[in-house]
Amino acid sequence: MSTQSSIGVIGAGPGGLMAALLLASRGHSVTIYEKSKRIGGRCAELVRGDYSWDLGPTFLIYKEILENCFKQASLKVEDYLDIRSLDPMYKLFFADSDLDVYFNKKALSHELEKKFPGAAAEFKNFMIKEKKRFKALKPCLERDFSSLSDYFSLNLIKALPHLGLGSTVMKRLRSSFSSDERALSFGFQAKYLGMSAWDCPSMFSILPYLEHEYGVHHVMGGLNKIMEALAKASKKFGAKIHLNTAVKEVLTEKGAATGVLLENGKVEKFDDLVLNADFAYSMTHLFKQQDLRKYKEKKLEKMDYSCSTFMLYLGLKRSYQLPFHSVVFAKDYARNVEEVFKKGLLSKDFSFYIRTPNQLDSSSAPSGHTAMYVLVPVPNLKIGSVDWKKQKMNYRDLVIKTIQKRMKIEVSDAIEVEEVVTPEDWQTKHNVHHGATFNLSHNWRQLAMFRPKNSFCDVKNVFLVGGGTHPGSGLPTIFESSRIAARLIEEKHGRFFESYETEKFSQNYKPVSF
């Protein structure tokens, strides 16, 4: 029998907002609770004075998932967002060279041959192999693994030869490219998952393929505007969003969730709950331990977590002629990776990422000024022993000094506004367990059927979305987790939730050169 249900969503991050849109558009009564004063979670907008930044993600790749989710709600994403294609997509800075990475294949081939003779042919062969691989793996990323039949599906059986079990992104790329430097040009994307290319499972070599096949995009105003669009669209279908309203506890009865207890003492009852809060934080703060079977606190501490990030949000009273996205590699990249992911040390020679949108998008800063976003991968609080209260400003000074040296610009004398976020801040201010910004690690022990399932196995009527569940971190996969959760809820209530094809990609947006 087909029925609609009342659904509570805990957290107004990208996973919760997308799930709310998909479910509200199909007639369910949806209520979202967000502890902060702004929507977005780690994708929120950060505003300081006349400057604004994305708090977290700044790369939009494989935007077709976003487009198709809107289509499933009978909406057009272009009615809500102004999305631009970037070309070049970003610039890579090595110790003694640099590389403009173009979406245009002819321009990229020319650049590769200029910097790495022979690399254009290697890239072409890499793309052919990864296209075949992505086609095989995609169905596995679009399904849940909540039932035994999922483990023996034809799609999964067909995908097995393409998984590269036990191998890593770096090994996979070194089979295509003849040097580590060339391989790193197409392997740094492991950092999108908070992992090292030497440890990240080889299946994620599809990330550079997705960039080069479908492009890297920018949403005018920042990726936080996606969150605003999802909220606006959800409200159109009747969803209610309560800000400054924290959930204290998930209420259960006989192994099933019945509602939530809010911090203000109010009890709200629901048929189903969508959980978008940080997974490990939720297990340790929102559930009574006796209600959990598999994911008790002891189990969580045995799990592996991504790296953390040291963030600088700089409001600069100067305009810079820098790439939109700049990825700067440590001079000794392998050592930097070892220190961050294995030894838990702060590197003096570190890799970092900068976004300076002012040449394309002037909305984030006053005219002639720059809202500079800086991200440095650092150890999470589980493996690191850094005293961030003591080291915060010292490391801030080192990061600014390094930016000035590597990018050949002056920054310190132009700072008008700044915000610094450390791993400790991620944990205490944003409820990110161990400050692991990219959530649970994506190693082989925590992927697919070994990752927390979208239909939560410990408590019935709870559905997981976000980076801590299947398929994983990153906006495309987070949106996919929402789509999976929405389908599971629909099926639970006897309703059909259509699938969509992602074979063909819309090229309606013209590249912006600058």
Image (cartoon, rainbow, N blue to C red):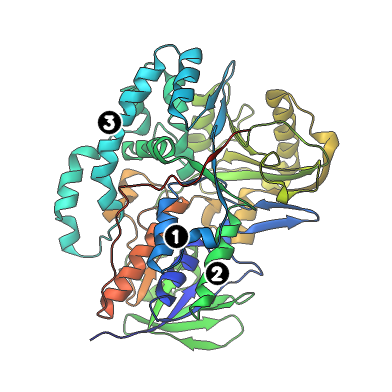
Q: Horizontally, is 446 left or right of 276 in the view? A: left
Type of residue at label 1?
A: Gly
Q: What residue is rendered at 20% in x and 44% in y?
A: 159
Which one is earlier in the sequence, the residue at label 3 or at label 1?
3
Q: Quadrant of the C terminus?
A: top right
Question: Which residue is identified by label 3?
Answer: 129
| Above or below 20: residue 470 | above
Label 3: state its secondary structure.
Answer: helix
Structural crowding at the residue carrying mark 3, measured as other residues with C-alpha within 10 Å and reported as few (<14), some (14–19) or many (≥20): some
Which one is earlier in the sequence, the residue at label 1 or at label 2?
2
Residue 354 image-quadrant placement: top right
Label 2: state its secondary structure.
Answer: helix
Residue 458 image-quadrant placement: bottom left
Q: Horizontally, is 18 left or right of 500 in the view? A: right
The label shown at residue 466 is 1
Depth check, mark 3 against mark 1: the one in front is 3
Q: Quadrant of the N terminus?
A: bottom left
- 468 or 282: nearer the viewer: 468
Distance from disc 3 to disc 1, alpha carbons, whole Å, reads 29 Å
| Above or below 455: residue 120 | above
Relative image position of residue 427 (x, y in whole percent) = 59, 57
Question: Which residue is identified by label 2?
Answer: 231
Type of residue at label 2?
A: Ala
Type of residue at label 3?
A: Lys
Relative image position of residue 266 (x, y in whole percent) = 56, 88
Relative image position of residue 97 (x, y in whole percent) = 58, 17
On the question of residue 41 being in view, the answer is yes
Structural crowding at the residue carrying mark 2, measured as other residues with C-alpha within 10 Å and reported as few (<14), some (14–19) or many (≥20): many
Label 1: state its secondary structure.
Answer: loop
Distance from disc 3 to disc 2, alpha carbons, whole Å, reads 39 Å
Relative image position of residue 238 (x, y in whole percent) = 50, 81
Q: What residue is rendered at 40% in x and 81% in y?
A: 28
